[in-house]
Image: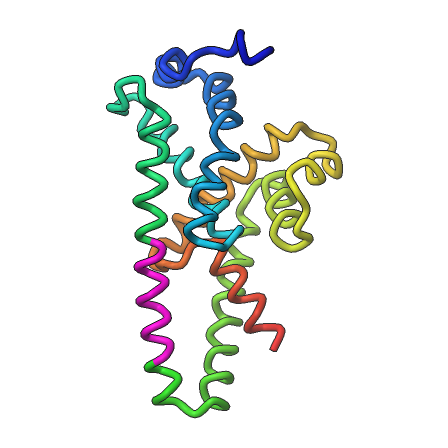
Amino acid sequence: MTNATLPADAALLQRIKSGDQEAFGLLYRRYFARLSHFAFRRLQDAAVTEELVMDVFFELWQQRQTLAAEGNIAGWLHATLRNKALHELRARATREKHLGVFAIKQPAATEDAEAAFDARLLQARMDTAISRLSPQCREAFTLSRQEHLSYKEIAERMGISVKTVEKHMSKALGLLRQDFSEYQTGVIVLAGLLEIVLQR
């Protein structure tokens, strides 16, 4: 399908509101790269950027029937992502402030030991959460987060389409986000922090 024959955003939005997954996939591919570029320029963190953009599309699908975008889906996507990026920046500043105060009050050795212990408990909890994913969903998530493969590489390794990989990742992130809803840190960032602490 050429650019000239691609459906307009308003038409895709109407189809998405009726539950059309193909239209959702077209919109995802149309805006994923530009939204990622938009967020990365502000956050300078590829993992957090990917999670926030995925979260925006997850929210779009969840709210599709009541979405008041009035045909301007690009504006809705950018506004939603901008709000999430600002929230992440504020949360990041708060975490850095608290970590700075904690570092002053606690001896370095004690802090490292406690952080490693907490990280192991949290890692065990995350392992349990990941084990509850479906086999293919778990494999896609593991290949992405532990072997750091791209979606295309995962698709080739598993013998499935890139679109199916995207669906598995979206489902995995959504379920893990529910399990770790008490953490302001995103699931991807949380997994990265665990990896850093446990490798010390």
**Image vertical order of residue 94 relative to residue 176, above or below:** below
Residue with the most extreme top position: 5
**Image vertical order of residue 34 relative to residue 1, above or below:** below
| Residue 97 at x, y percent in the picture | 32, 73
| Residue 67 at x, y percent in the picture | 27, 25
The answer to which quarter of the image holds residue 156 is top right
Q: Total marks drawn?
A: 0
Residue at 74% from the left image edge and 31% from the top image edge: 159
| Residue 115 at x, y percent in the picture | 47, 78
Residue at 60% from the left image edge and 29% from the top image edge: 164
Inspect the magenta stretch and tell me whether residue 76 lies in it.
Answer: no
Residue at 54% from the left image edge and 32% from the top image edge: 167
Horizontal arrangement in the rendering, residue 66 relative to residue 130 (left or right) = left
**Image vertical order of residue 111 relative to residue 70, above or below:** below
Horizontal arrangement in the rendering, residue 174 relative to residue 98 (left or right) = right
Colour pattern? rainbow
| Residue 21 at x, y percent in the picture | 48, 20
Range of the magenta residues?
88-100
Inspect the magenta stretch and tell me whether residue 98 lies in it.
Answer: yes
Q: Nearer the viewer, residue 26 or 160?
A: 26
In the rendered image, the quadrant that contains the N terminus is top right
In the rendered image, the quadrant that contains the C terminus is bottom right
**Image vertical order of residue 115 relative to residue 85, above or below:** below
Q: Main secondary structure of the magenta part?
A: helix
Residue at 41% from the left image edge and 35% from the top image edge: 58
Q: Nearer the viewer, residue 100 or 14?
A: 100
